[in-house]
């Protein structure tokens, strides 16, 4: 991944110049699980304060790409990543990059709500504590309240902060997980099918939340729902069998895609 | 918008033909299976009850001890005939105290002091431990010399057994350990209330003794306690650390596979092998003292480690991966993920495994025999380096004694051991509940 050729660097710089609000960019990203290659030379830009949706049929590598963005793939023994991924100007696969700091800057929300089996308060306060964002009780209270406010959960849980987070409903748990990710003030939030375990009402709430979060964060969301991608995102990237097929403005993607496969997928012809 | 009435009526009415699928047979099979289960459980329960009944019915009398209250006259002529105790206190240590007790009891029973045969029988009703008992009274307070004080002395083992009804009186007198005359005396003393049973505290505080009435599991309890402390202090941290390393950090390769297989094998190694290992390594090589609870504790630690490691690894594996992902995704380091999230969730499982391992170690006998913990230890060990025995070993030693009074003590000691095991298991359940309530 460090064997970046001159031309690749130029490509990155060129893209950065044409698009000033670039937050993250992947260049020639390949991912292997053992011998099997799951992603082939993906080049994808993620713009600041934008919601980027990753779509594509099951098994096409959406989650794999998402996990390369905060190096969660490191936790899979057989997984190997090549290519270059920049966060602002930092190569996140540089050996000098501290993965702990990276994940504080690039937070993640998972498909299944996974609150810690601790109190609601502790769920939110944990991240700030390990990253030293707060010291006094008052500072923690402040972060907990503002994070829950941002996740639209404050009014529902403000009287039961000491109760277990696992006692909330599925939708509330997912918003708690979003609040937990927000609490460490990341720059980018990755969401892997955050609504797939939720009912339509909880889904609507989370989508609304994503809208609001966009003002302060850069969001990358994997979704299987075309409607959801259309509703929440400004940019959409379509993956197919490990290749990035098309990356475009969401409006254009859903009305007049450039690629035949995108069209087929959006029309529901495969996937 | 399909209208039901407009659909072909044939489609709605013609249910597909049902095939014979043997519902009755399925239910019968289920009932049979349940019956087998109930039978198996009843079988187990019956044997458990039999075991408990046999131990308790034999052993409960061990918790009672017969005592005789006699007014002992501390005659100066017997204790210190030359009156030299002021200059030579050793005289008080060596005096012939049993005679005092014998004479006092003879007087109480109205036995002629000239009848040597009768006096001998009287003497054999009192435990030989009376020597130490009276000596301690006199040494602690020499002013009792010359006075008459009522003293509760232990009845001899056979008297104790006879009073508890353990001696078969249909056997001819000459083959019995207790004579008709002695039986008469027992009744006479019991009628006056001078011979009675009381709770046998000696069973818990005394050390080894060749006299059953004076023998207790005190030393064995201390030895077992020291060993449990050592096992807990060594096996728990080592076991948990090893499991965390193997489960969370170690690369998965041939070497770790081999280690894993060997840990599982070690858990199945007969405990006596650990005893041999302890003998070779700790005693012969490291030069630690024989019969010491330190060595016993080390051997039992080795024996318990595989159990704890297996239980801990299972508990760590059972922690949902989503919790790890959540912590890692927040930017927690691997250590933080493990110590803040994984370990607390695995705690109930780890504790259960540890306590089961400890309980196993508490009841272990074979390896302790090999490292010399099967010794006659009358004095309390103050440190784990001093000789001691262990509860199960004490049971083993008493089980080899022929006297009737030791039979009941064997069962009594088994009851004590079972109570400890029960207490530990209840402790495990309570701890598990406590930790589980903290989600
Ligand atoms: N841990 C892993 N080990 C080996 N192969 C994996 C692993 N995770 C994913 N893969 C493979 O990589 C490919 C891409 O998987 P990925 O999970 O990224 O798909 P996805 O697009 O997220 O699919 P879905 O929409 O079903 O979640 C698949 O072929 C999958 O089998
Ligand atoms: Mg996926």
Image: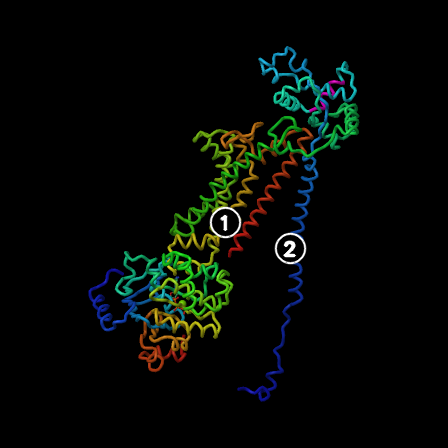
In the rendered view, does A233 fall on the left or right side of B64?
Answer: left
Residue A91 visible in the picture:
yes
Instruction: Please identify, in this view, whether the residue under mark 1 or under mark 2 is nearer the observer.
Output: 1
- In the image as oriented, which residue stretches furthest toward the front? A138
Q: In this view, does B299 lie above or below B150?
A: below
Please state the extent of the stretch shown in magenta in the rendering: B118-126
Q: In this view, does A221 lie above or below B434?
A: below
Q: Residue B350 carries which label?
A: 1
Subunit ID for the residue under disc 2: B
C-alpha gap between disc 1 and disc 2: 30 Å
Q: Residue B53 carries which label?
A: none
- Residue A89's quadrant in the figure? bottom left
Most common SS among magenta residues: helix
- B109 or A249: which is nearer to us? B109
Please state the horizontal and vertical placement of residue A61, each as a whole percent of the image: 36, 68
Please state the horizontal and vertical placement of residue A176, each as a whole percent of the image: 45, 65
- B167 or B261: which is nearer to us? B167
Residue A239 visible in the picture:
no
Per the image, label 1 sits on a secondary structure element best described as helix
Please state the horizontal and vertical placement of residue B218, each as a whole percent of the image: 59, 32
State the residue position of label 2: B37
In the rendered view, does B171 fall on the left or right side of A206?
Answer: right
- B89 or B334: which is nearer to us? B89
The image quadrant in which ligand 1 is located: bottom left
Q: Is residue B169 above or below residue A74?
A: above
Per the image, label 2 sits on a secondary structure element best described as helix
């Amino acid at each position: 991944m460090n064997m970046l050729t001159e031309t690749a660097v130029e490509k990155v710089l060129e893209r950065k110049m044409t698009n000033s609000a670039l937050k993250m960019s992947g260049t020639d990203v390949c991912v292997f699980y053992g011998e099997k290659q799951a992603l082939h030379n993906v080049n994808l830009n993620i713009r600041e304060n934008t919601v980027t949706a990753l779509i594509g049929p099951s098994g096409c590598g959406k989650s794999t790409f998402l996990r390369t963005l905060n190096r969660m793939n490191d936790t899979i023994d057989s997984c190997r990543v090549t290519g270059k991924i920049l966060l602002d100007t930092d190569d996140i696969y540089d050996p000098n990059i501290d993965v702990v700091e990276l994940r504080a800057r690039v937070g993640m929300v998972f498909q299944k709500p996974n609150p810690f089996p601790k109190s609601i308060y502790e769920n939110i306060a944990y991240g700030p504590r390990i990253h030293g964002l707060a010291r006094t009780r008052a500072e923690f209270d402040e972060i907990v309240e503002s994070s829950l406010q941002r996740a639209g959960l404050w009014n529902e849980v403000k009287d039961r902060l000491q109760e277990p987070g696992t006692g909330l409903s599925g939708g509330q748990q997912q918003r708690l997980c979003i609040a937990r990710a927000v609490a460490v003030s990341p720059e980018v939030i990755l969401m892997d099918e955050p609504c797939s375990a939720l009912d339509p009402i909880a889904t609507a709430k989370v989508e609304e939340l994503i809208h609001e979060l966009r003002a302060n964060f850069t969001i990358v969301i994997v979704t299987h729902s075309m409607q959801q991608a259309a509703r929440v995102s400004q940019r959409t990237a379509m993956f197919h069998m490990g290749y990035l097929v098309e990356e475009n403005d969401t409006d254009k993607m859903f009305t007049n895609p450039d690629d035949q496969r995108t069209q087929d997928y959006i029309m529901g012809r495969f996937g | 918008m399909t209208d039901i009435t407009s659909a072909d009526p044939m489609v709605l009415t013609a249910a597909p033909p049902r095939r014979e699928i043997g519902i009755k047979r399925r239910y019968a099979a289920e009932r049979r299976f349940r019956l087998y289960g109930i039978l198996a459980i009843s079988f187990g329960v019956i044997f458990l009850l039999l075991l408990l009944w046999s131990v308790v019915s034999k052993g409960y009398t061990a918790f009672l001890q017969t005592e005789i209250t006699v007014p002992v006259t501390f005659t100066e002529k017997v204790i210190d005939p030359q009156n030299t105790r002021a200059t030579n206190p050793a005289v008080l240590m060596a005096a012939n105290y049993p005679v005092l007790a014998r004479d006092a009891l003879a007087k109480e029973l109205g036995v002629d002091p000239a009848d040597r045969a009768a006096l001998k029988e009287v003497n054999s009703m009192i435990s030989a431990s009376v020597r130490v008992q009276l000596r301690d009274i006199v040494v602690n307070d020499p002013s009792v010399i010359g006075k008459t004080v009522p003293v509760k002395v232990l009845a001899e083992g056979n008297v104790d057994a006879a009073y508890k009804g353990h001696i078969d009186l249909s056997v001819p007198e000459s083959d019995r350990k207790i004579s008709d005359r002695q039986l008469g005396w027992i009744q006479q003393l019991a009628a006056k209330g001078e011979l009675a049973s009381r709770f046998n505290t000696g069973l818990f505080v005394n050390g080894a003794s060749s006299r059953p009435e004076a023998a207790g599991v005190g030393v064995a309890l201390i030895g077992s306690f020291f060993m449990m402390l050592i096992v807990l202090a060594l096996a728990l941290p080592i076991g948990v650390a090893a499991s965390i390393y193997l489960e969370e950090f170690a690369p998965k390769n041939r070497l770790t596979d081999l280690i894993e297989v060997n840990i599982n094998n070690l858990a199945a190694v007969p405990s006596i092998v650990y005893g041999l290992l302890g003998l070779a390594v700790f005693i012969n090589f490291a030069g630690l003292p024989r019969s010491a609870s330190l060595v016993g504790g080390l051997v039992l630690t080795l024996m318990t480690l595989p159990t704890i490691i297996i239980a801990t690894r299972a508990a760590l594996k059972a922690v949902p991966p989503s919790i790890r992902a959540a912590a890692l995704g927040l930017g927690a380091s691997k250590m933080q993920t493990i110590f803040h999230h994984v370990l607390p969730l695995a705690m109930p499982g780890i504790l259960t495994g540890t306590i089961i391992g400890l309980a196993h170690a508490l009841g272990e006998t074979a390896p302790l025999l090999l490292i010399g913990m099967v010794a006659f230890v009358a004095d309390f060990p103050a440190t784990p380096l001093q000789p001691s025995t262990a509860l199960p070993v004490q049971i083993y030693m008493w089980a080899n004694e022929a006297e009737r009074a030791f039979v009941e003590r064997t069962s009594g000691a088994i009851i004590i051991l079972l109570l400890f095991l029960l207490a530990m298991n209840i402790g495990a359940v309570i701890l598990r509940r406590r930790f589980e309530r903290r989600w």
